[in-house]
Amino acid sequence: MGKLLLAIDDVSLPFRKNVGLYLTKPAVRQEPVLRPSPFGSGAPDDLAAYFYGTVLYDEGKYRMWYYASHWEKNPDWPPEKMKQVAKAPWWFHGESSHFKTFGGPLCYAESDDGTNWTKPALGQVLFKGTVDNNAIDLPHTSVSAAIVIKDMEDPDPNRRYKMTYQFFVDQCEEVIAEYGTWNSVALAVSPDGINWTMTAIPYKDQFLEPSSFTKFNGMYIIHYHVMGETEGYRSEGGHACGRTGVARVSPDFDFWPDVLVETFAPTEPEDPGKRGHDGTYDQVHLGVGAASFGNVCVGLYGLWHNADFNNAFDQISGDLGLLVSNDGIHFREPVKGYRFIHREDSLATPVPGYNFHTILCQANGILNVGDQTLIYHGRWRNAGGHEDDVDLNQYASSEVALATIPRDRWGAFGLNPDANDGTVCSAAIILPTDCALSLNADGIAGLKVKLLDKNFHTIPDYDIGVVVGSDGLDCPVEWAGKSLAELGGRTVRISMQMNRLGDDSPRLYALNITDKSAGRSK
């Protein structure tokens, strides 16, 4: 199996001297790639298209699953689904409040280029008099968070696509007895990503807003967040916690143990009385939006700038922070507190005469296609907190946005401003049996590569590796008369020597150790 060593990964590349980390500023497309359908059109998403969802690049096509919000109730829900919206809880709107907005169903879109999307008519859900819509039929109506993976390792083609989604429990007695009163998560499988079968509801009376679903090291991992005193999770000292990223894991997608693990959380106030999800300090919204790249995960988290939840919800805004992990569960910031995508760089479509805050939302939206890393995310236009103002309620919308970086260029090692040379050295790595090394780098004329044993001693004949070709995403490294494959199976460290040439400092973004027998590691 190949390995991807990212500059932002201080576990894989922990050692350095005279070298600093320079994070990349992504390019953000100002226009959304997916908007809600026209307001009042009767479409399932005529109010909002929330990217609590997924984008996959699947057999040459971009495919998106997202959660819709619509204006005024669908009168065509069958009786067992109508009761789910007849008594929807206050936090999900419905007739029990002054809102005319309803969340769900989940919807599907597709694209040939990743920026121009269509909403195909699936013919699955009768919605306001027609099945000519892109809604997905599921057992639940009040739903969100369409988090999908394609699991090619599953031998059953009917389970190839796997999804976790959140549903909101309707308030009838028999449902409360089975599922509790709190929203939870359901699991579903599909042979094609279009026709889904719900397989399980693994937890009762617990779960809140899944942000991503990954498979890493053979484990299925659902990321989401907890807050307050939910799910038996507390802050230090047994106090209520603010929004905190957590995860649930399963070895097979069928058995999910009823335990959770903290994935990422910011610093909470020292004063326990100021903790909890209503505290007016920055918190983690939705947990981690993670993507697996073989041996490493990269993720985003919602940096939720909280306000008085009950009296000033419309003052809440949110940015996206950058995270990395080596086990798919425990994440850390390459640079603490860094706003990787600031809301001002990816603003929700404005409404003339209003100044609504933007909350950016992450999910299953990071993927590599060709020479680019695509970062799909949601722009939530926060017009919330005005239950009695119908005009403002209709502006509480969301859309799907796109940011890009060159492939795997999340951040780079570069010489410190006052340094003319420096070093970066990897952790000990077992090389694949048939391997090659390339660098994702600029300024390669100033780079040399040396191989060391696990005790940091130079391996004979591998002291001067030359980076050949021109700057780019895949710059091969060669040793005179030697092949890296000759060291296959050995434990080595890779040492990169960086030298300033004139005014130019090299930039090293990543190392790719490819297993030629298995193809590219990603």
Image (cartoon, rainbow, N blue to C red):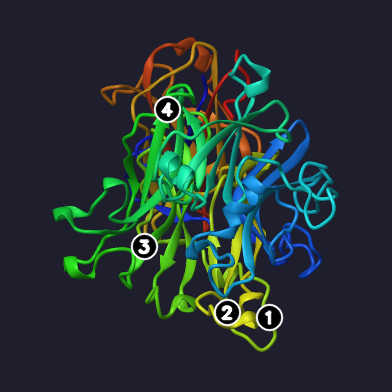
CB within 8 Å, label 3 to label 4: no
CB within 8 Å, label 1 to label 2: yes
Q: Earlier in the sequence, mark 2 or mark 4?
A: 4
- Cα separation between marks 1 and 4: 44 Å
Along the line of sight, which residue is nearer the eye, 256 or 321?
A: 256
Give the image location of residue 161, x and y in percent: 64, 29
- Cα separation between marks 3 and 2: 20 Å
The label number, if any, that marks residue 250 in the structure image: 4
The label number, if any, that marks residue 351 in the structure image: 1
Along the line of sight, which residue is nearer the eye, 511 or 77?
A: 77
Q: Is 113 placed left or right of 52 in the picture?
A: right
CB within 8 Å, label 3 to label 1: no
- Return the residue at label 2: 356
- Cα separation between marks 3 and 1: 27 Å
Q: Locate the C terminus by quadrant.
A: top right
The residue lying at 46 percent from left, 73 percent from top is 316
Q: Which of marks 3 and 4 is nearer the N terminus?
A: 4
CB within 8 Å, label 3 to label 2: no
- Outermost residue toward the left? 237
- Return the residue at label 3: 283
